[in-house]
Image (tube, rainbow, N blue to C red):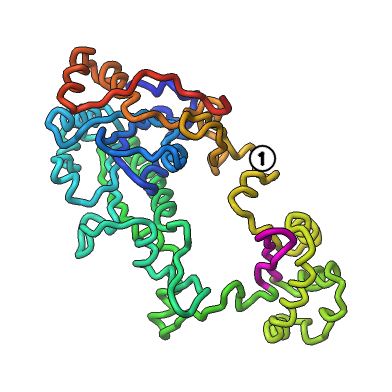
Amino acid sequence: MSKPEYTGGGSLSDLRVLDLTRVWAGPLATRILGDFGAQIIRIVDPRSLMPRASGYDNKLSRNKLNMAVRLDKDAGRQILLELASISDVVIENFRPRVMRNLRLSYDEIKAVNSEIVMCSMPGFGLEGPYSEYPAYGTTAEAFVAMPWLIGYDQSAPMPTGIAYGDPISGLNTVGALLASLRKRNMTGGGQFIDVALVAGPATTTGEFFVANSADGYEPEVRCNRQPDQAPHSAYKAAGDDNWIAIAVTSDEEWNSLCAIVDDESLCDARFSDLEGRKHHEDAIDNVISEWVKPRDAEELTALLQEAGVPAGRVANSRQLLDDRHLAARDFYVEFDEPEVGPKPYEGQSIPGNHVDKSRWQRAHQMGQDSRHVLVDLLGYSNDDCDALASEETVAFSHDMPNSAAGA
């Protein structure tokens, strides 16, 4: 099996993955596999748009080859099957009928490679009354009642803002694929995995299901407050839209906070235990708000943390990019991309065993690797490639070098 030419190691460098996924959940899963050295061949339709100027595609398509091929044409379908015959994983997140209509179901792919592990990531799974419904991360979190649990506004449910269903499902998919590949390596034989987008967030809210089924529990609207912690909120600091979150979880932390704030009104005996602080939480919040208001959120975070009080600046995206802790941990990676110029992107949250970031590749252009895949992996001739291009089955971009990380 050909190894990906751009890797410098990585614990998954012996894997080849055919990536037919779109949007976020699937591309996140394959990006993680690519970071750890797997050869990811991204399969895209030449007629589709790649929104690169927004940075959306850029952040999810690093370390992936880009093969532009129409699977609705017989020759394109044959190319996919030939690639599947020399690959370890096929992953897609269409609605169930799409792969059936393309005649690329698991049974048809397994016929050319009995060792293949195939993962489908439809919104609601391959079976059931909702199976053909389209879904995104926002609709997935809505179906499992997450906006009902946010608790900031009694008049309407509030979504998380990060399409929670997508990243959770992407991470679950990585674990499921690695477990299936381990089983294949131990016992032989491929496997099919059905990862429903809605199942990921559903498994993170189980205690609320149990509570409601047991006694009809309904979560109260409590904004930033917690029933067993006080004070517990976000407080406006100096500057434009700067905030700090403070959470006191014990009497010891409360005493440390009082010593730092140094306001006599907080020394009231009524505040000495959690019950009293919860009963008078509004008064406590008013004092802390006034104390925080003229101060810098980052400096306060350091001061409180050093005293053992849980606190953290509520960072916006720009502040997160400038965070000195993440910088010290070498979290970010920079790519110089034609559409947007040099930009930092999030790195890999799991340290070790991944390809060194200096060898990571920025997102490839549509069809940039079509010729490489056809000629070097499948043995097609250049004349074959030209014929496929003339038939509009495969698209080829001009050969362009990719800037490595930090270039």
Q: Viewed as shown, does residue 52 lie left or right of 286?
A: left
Q: Nearer the viewer, residue 111 or 149?
A: 149
Q: Nearer the viewer, residue 207 or 315?
A: 315
User: For residue 307, what is the image quadrant?
Assistant: bottom right
Name the residue at 29% across, 34% down. 43
Q: Is residue 302 above or below residue 39?
A: below
Q: Which residues are magenta?
A: 232-248
Q: Viewed as shown, does residue 265 lie left or right of 125?
A: right
Q: Quadrant of the N terminus?
A: top left
Q: Find residue 256 and report its horizontal and vertical position in percent.
A: 81, 68
**Magenta span includes 80:** no
Q: Find residue 217 and report its horizontal and vertical position in percent.
A: 45, 83
- Asked which secondary structure carries label 1, the reply is helix
Name the residue at 34% across, 20% down. 398
User: For residue 363, what is the image quadrant?
Assistant: top left
Q: Is residue 276 above or below residue 234?
A: below
Q: What amino acid type should be assigned to the residue bearing mark 1?
A: Ala
User: For residue 213, what is the image quadrant?
Assistant: bottom left
Name the residue at 34% across, 67% down. 143
Q: Find residue 166 and report its horizontal and vertical position in percent.
A: 40, 53
Q: Find residue 105 and report its horizontal and vertical position in percent.
A: 17, 43
Q: Is residue 60 above or below residue 141?
A: above
Q: Quadrant of the C terminus?
A: top right
Q: Can residue 187 be seen from the camera position used here?
A: no
User: Circle 1: is it few (<14), some (14-19), or many (20+) Cα within 10 Å?
Assistant: few
**Magenta span includes 233:** yes
The residue identified by callout 1 is: 327
Q: Viewed as shown, does residue 44 lie left or right of 70?
A: right
Name the residue at 25% across, 45% down. 192
Q: Nearer the viewer, residue 71 or 307?
A: 71
